[in-house]
Amino acid sequence: MFKTLYVRIVFYYFSAVLIGVVVAWASALFVFQDSKNKYTESELREKGENIVKLYNQTNPEDKQLFLEKAAQLSSVRLKIVAPDSQEEQFINWSAEDSFCDCDLSIIVPWVLNGDVYHMELAQSSSVDAYGSSVLTEIALILAIVLLVGGSIILLFARHLVSPIQKVTIAAKQLATGDFNVKLPEDRRDEMGSLSTAINQMAVELGQLDRERQEFVANVSHEFQSPLTLIKGFSTMLLEGTLNESERVRSIEIMMQESDRLSKLSEHLLRLATIDSEKYVSSKVYFDLAEQIRRTVLTFEPLWSARQLDVEMRASRTMVHADEELLNQVWINLMSNAIKFAPIGGKIAIDLYAEEEQVKVGFFDNGISIASEDRERIFHRFFKADRARDRSIEGNGLGLSIVKKIVDIHEGSVQVQSDSGDGKTFIVIIPKSAEARGALVKS
């Protein structure tokens, strides 16, 4: 029945006001009628007593004529009933008299020549003119209230519904994938808060959509590049145009690209796992220094082959965390340091145990990171070497995995880099009360 909120508001208002007007009219009519009856009874009694007093003072010869004139002058209807009988001595109204409010009457005793007569008086319609005018004025006032209030609510409802209509249009715009939504935020009420929230949501959805598109493009690029190489070398091998050394080199490149695809798939699977809302972190107590030390030893063949000087300064530090996830953090950071440190360069790992948290720093004296890239470096598929130099292996997912895992532990990760002096990745992880207690006991 009501397809719009505007019509619904107006209808509800008119319904409420109309009910209020009807109730007010009925209440006013009841109060006025009760007040009028009391006033009429008092007035009729006074008129009856005056008629009796005047008759006794003048003692007219023609009683019938006197009563007619008295009733006419007093604007009342009279009925005189003889004592000890129901015989009407005088009457100037009938039950069908439409000009008389004969339902409301009073009886005034009249002692005449020792006999008690009953003088019944009823109100003439001429006296009701004032009452009717008052009721008419009340009805007119209520009608004006209804009309004026209705006009105001029409404007008010339009003012109220207008921002809701804008929000509806914005929501439909968002649903179509258009995130260029900007609602006015000048209001200070609930609608203003809603507009602000929708604007923020539009910005975040737009950012997510851009990241999604960039993610799809990057995944496609990272998969397509090694597949193109593998296909090209496979074609040359099938054609048999390569000599033995070229064949070996081609196979080595194909194996390297296959490894890249494998690592990319592994990283994507890891991201999908920790991004899942169903992922449940399994936290245990363990020595963080020992875990990092094992990671460093695992990579010894790689950093030894590059003649890197690796230093680690750490003492036993108990934490309450997801051991498997944090191990992935150290693997990614160590791999990143080995990859970018120059041959014969240096890697330094420092662990600082504080009262409430643990800081772990991974330093390498390789290429530094520009200040404008230090925030974006943790974005998926972002590479500081913008040309995507294929001589440096990597798919731009390692640091984003680090950031995601650290966020799960309610920690933080940042990078410090001075021009020409390498870079340091600093991971901060809070310690639980139980882990702090275990460290003290040890």
Image: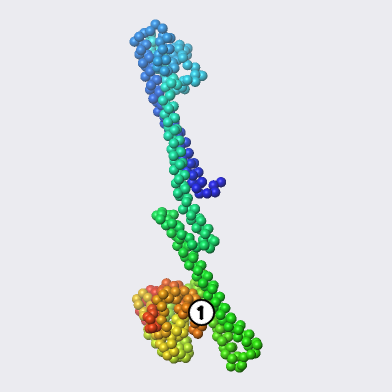
Picture coordinates of residue 194, whole percent (x, y) = 45, 57
Q: Residue at the spot x=44%, y=31% of the render?
A: 29
Picture coordinates of residue 373, whole percent (x, y) = 43, 76
Question: Can residue 189 be seen?
Answer: yes
Q: Residue at the spot x=43%, y=27% of the render?
A: 133
**Secondary structure found at label 1:** loop
Picture coordinates of residue 269, whole percent (x, y) = 54, 76
Picture coordinates of residue 56, whole percent (x, y) = 35, 10
Residue farthest to the bottom? 244
- Above or below, 107 against 171 in this view is above
Question: Can residue 317 be seen?
Answer: no
- Above or below, 82 against 229 in this view is above
Residue farthest to the top? 61
Q: Nearer the viewer, residue 254 or 335?
A: 254
Q: Quadrant of residue 137?
A: top left
Number of labels in the image equals: 1
Q: Nearer the viewer, residue 130 or 410?
A: 130
Q: How is the image coloured?
A: rainbow
Q: Residue at the spot x=56%, y=75% of the render?
A: 220
- Residue type indicated by callout 1: Asn
Quadrant holding the C terminus:
bottom left
Q: Nearer the viewer, residue 146 or 288?
A: 146
Q: Residue at the spot x=35%, y=13% of the render?
A: 53
Q: Is residue 241 left or right of residue 178?
A: right
Q: Nearer the viewer, residue 217 or 353?
A: 217
Residue bearing the label numbered 1: 395
Label 1 packing within 10 angstroms: few (<14), some (14-19), many (20+): many
